[in-house]
Amino acid sequence: MSFLTTIRKEGSSWLEALRALHELNKDHDDTTQVFRIIQALRSDSNERALERFRTTPVGARVLAENRCLIEALSDRATLAAMPDGSLGRAYLDFMVAQGITAEGLAGMSTGIWNEDGPPEMVTFQSWSRDMHDLWHVAVGYGPDPLGELCLLAFTYAQYESRGVGLIALMGALRYSLQCRDVRIARAVLQGHRIGRSSEWLPSHDWEALLALPIEEVRRRLRLRPTTAYAAARALMPKHHRSGIAPVAPYVQPA
């Protein structure tokens, strides 16, 4: 591929990502734009992540068995029967409070991600997508705009996806300038640092983790407290603080 061809391809991808970012800025709840940005700037990050996933015991089993996390996340009767304080019960509370479902998140990616690609890539992309709201609960970030940005920064540290990093960066800059307070950016940056210092979350058996206490899950995954998020959320514009579910925020001293 020639240099000019590369520039033309990259330029088209960035233009598509910026268009989607513009639409996302107009409607922060339009999750389909997030998938569009990620897909436009995917580069080879998916392939690298899949290769890493394939070398882990859990990843190898997920790929061999074509496992789908959404089946466990959609079984609300089983989740409701889990102990108080468990990841599964907290996840169910989170989803009910927000009025969302695991199937709904999956549906938003339909027609955007390459569902006709190599089977292992399709399985891995689905596994990664369906973990998103579980990570909200496990890491301790609410579904408000700042919590989403912090979790995206965390996710960027885990996957090194340019699209995810772009959304987190632009959001941090936007709200820091709007609120005139650097603590917004610090909260997002802390999300990235927590993601770098934790375990690689895709390689863990989230179906098995559902029944464990949240604090035990956080210890196993080496998740540090989200103190900067707790301090910065109150700085956000009032209409951007809504949507806080009982997410069991992780703000205790380490």
Image (spheres, rainbow, N blue to C red):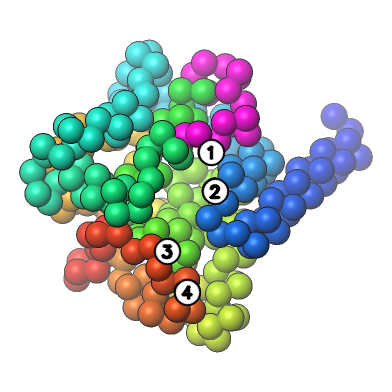
Question: In terms of image quadrants, where is residue 87?
Answer: top left
Q: Which residue is mark 4?
A: 239
Q: Residue 78, position in %: x, y?
A: 16, 32
User: Which quadrant is home to the N terminus?
Assistant: top right
Q: Report if the CB atoms under discs 3 and 2 are less than 8 Å apart.
A: no
Q: Give, as a three-letter code, the residue at label 1.
A: Met
Q: Residue furthest top?
A: 64
Q: Report if the CB atoms under discs 3 and 4 are less than 8 Å apart.
A: no
Q: Secondary structure at mark 1?
A: helix
**In this rendering, position of residue 152 left or right of residue 116:** left
Q: Is residue 99 above or below residue 146?
A: above
Q: Which residue is mark 1?
A: 108
Mark 2 crowdedness (10 Å alpha carbons): few <14, some 14-19, many ≥20: few
Q: Residue 42, position in %: x, y?
A: 63, 39
Q: Give, as a three-letter code, the residue at label 2.
A: Thr
Q: Secondary structure at mark 3?
A: loop
Mark 3 crowdedness (10 Å alpha carbons): few <14, some 14-19, many ≥20: some
Q: Secondary structure at mark 2?
A: helix
Mark 1 crowdedness (10 Å alpha carbons): few <14, some 14-19, many ≥20: some
Q: Is residue 114 magenta?
A: yes
Label ID, residue 144:
3
Q: Earlier in the sequence, mark 1 or mark 3?
A: 1
Q: Report if the CB atoms under discs 1 and 3 are less than 8 Å apart.
A: no
Q: Residue 129, position in %: x, y?
A: 45, 37
Q: Distance of mark 4 from mark 1, alpha carbons?
A: 24 Å
Q: Earlier in the sequence, mark 2 or mark 4?
A: 2
What is the magenta range? 106-121
> Can residue 162 be seen in the rendering of this structure?
no
Q: Which residue is mark 2?
A: 31
Q: Earlier in the sequence, mark 2 or mark 1?
A: 2
